[in-house]
């Protein structure tokens, strides 16, 4: 799951440094934030999201969406700030089979 999230983050970031990630994951996936954060930290090492925090928004159902990314201040100062709505992120992360 975290590998798919990271792939989506990297596509959105386009090489820019990421400091935060927000995902919307349905309760049917039974994801808990501490486990998600630990797993994301491991898979993100050495990537544009190395050291980025991850926030879990739990919603009903089986949704699995990258809601937004937060870029470093330097990237934002260069006009690269990017926030996405859940609808924009719907195609970023493929549905988890579990």
Image (cartoon, grey):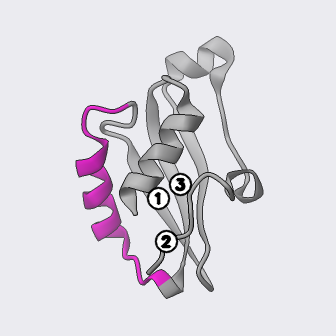
Quarter of the image for residue 39 reads bottom left
Residue 72, given in percent of the width and then of the height, sits at 48, 26
Instruction: Count numbered badges in the picture.
Output: 3
Residue receiving disc 2: 96
Q: Looking at the picture, how far across and down is residue 76, in whole percent?
A: 60, 22
- Residue assigned mark 3: 22
Relative height, residue 31 to residue 40 (above, below): below
Q: Position of residue 30 (x, y in %)?
A: 42, 84
**Residue 66, numbered circle:** none
Earlier sequence position, callout 2 versus callout 3: 3
Rounded to the nearest angstrom, the CA distance separating label 1 from label 2 is 18 Å
Residue position for label 1: 55
Residue 16 counted in the magenta span: no
Label 2 neighbour load within 10 Å: few <14, some 14-19, many 20+: few
Q: Relative to the observer, which residue lies in front, 51 or 40?
A: 40
Work out whether 15 lies above or below 66: above
Check if mark 1's residue and mark 2's residue have beta carbons within 8 Å. no
The region drawn magenta spans 29-47
Comes first in the chain, label 3 or label 1: 3
Quick check: marks 3 and 1 in contact, CB under 8 Å?
yes
Mark 1 residue element? strand
């Amino acid at each position: 799951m975290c590998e798919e999230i990271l792939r989506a983050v990297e596509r959105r970031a386009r090489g820019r440094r990421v400091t935060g990630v927000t995902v919307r994951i349905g309760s049917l996936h039974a994801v808990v934030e501490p486990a998600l954060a630990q797993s994301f930290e491991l898979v993100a090492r050495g990537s544009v999201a190395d050291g980025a925090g991850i926030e879990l928004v739990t919603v009903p159902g089986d949704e699995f969406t990258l809601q937004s990314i937060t870029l470093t201040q330097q990237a934002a100062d260069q006009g690269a700030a990017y926030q996405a709505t859940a609808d924009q992120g719907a195609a970023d992360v493929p549905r988890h089979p579990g």
